[in-house]
Image (cartoon, grey):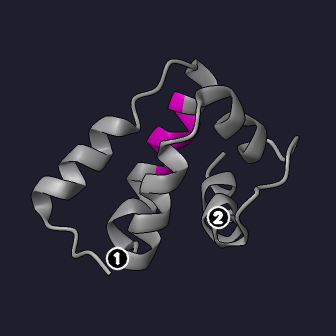
Amino acid sequence: MAQFDDTAKRRIRFQTRRGLLELDIVLKRFMATEFDQLSDEELAIFVDILALEDQEFLALVNQVESPKRTDFEQLLAKIRHNK
């Protein structure tokens, strides 16, 4: 499992800036309340979630679609909690 140092965490923070305003708002709240407490395993999953297209990511956050990966669900629940 990868270790996430400060540089890696700054990169992840930058990746949370999205093209959809609703997604930006949700992620800004999530980053303010949850990001610093994420484990390396959760950070690795978050990076994979951030690799999704904005529309797919938003559909998962809004529970319009179910994630194809079961390991996404717990982190998506944390993101939704800050919605």
- Secondary structure that dominates the magenta span: helix
Q: Is residue 66 visible?
A: yes
Vertically, is 76 above or below 11? Answer: below
Q: How much space separates mark 2 and mark 1, taking CA atoms?
A: 14 Å
Extent of the magenta region: 24-30
Q: Nearer the viewer, residue 64 or 69?
A: 69
Q: Residues within 10 Å of mark 1 (few under 14, many from 20)?
A: some
Looking at the image, residue 48 sits to the left or right of residue 58; the answer is left
Residue 36 image offset from top left, x and y in percent: 32, 66
Task: Report the quarter where the C terminus lies.
Answer: top right
Residue at 77% in and 37% down: 59
- Asked whether residue 39 is in view, the answer is no
First along the sequence among labels 2 and 1: 1
Residue 72, which numbered label? Answer: 2
Nearest the eye: 7 or 37: 7
Query: From the viewer's perspective, is residue 80 above or below residue 24?
Result: below
Give me the residue at 70% from left, 35% from top.
56
Q: Secondary structure at mark 1?
A: helix
Residue type at mark 1: give it.
Asp
The answer to whether residue 43 is above or below residue 24 is below
Q: Position of residue 28 (x, y in %)?
A: 45, 39
Question: Tag 2, which secondary structure?
Answer: helix
> Which residue is denoted by mark 1 in the rendering?
40
Left or right: 40 in relation to 6:
right
In this view, 10 is above or below 35: above
The quadrant holding residue 67 is bottom right
Residue under the image location 31 percent in, 48 percent down: 12
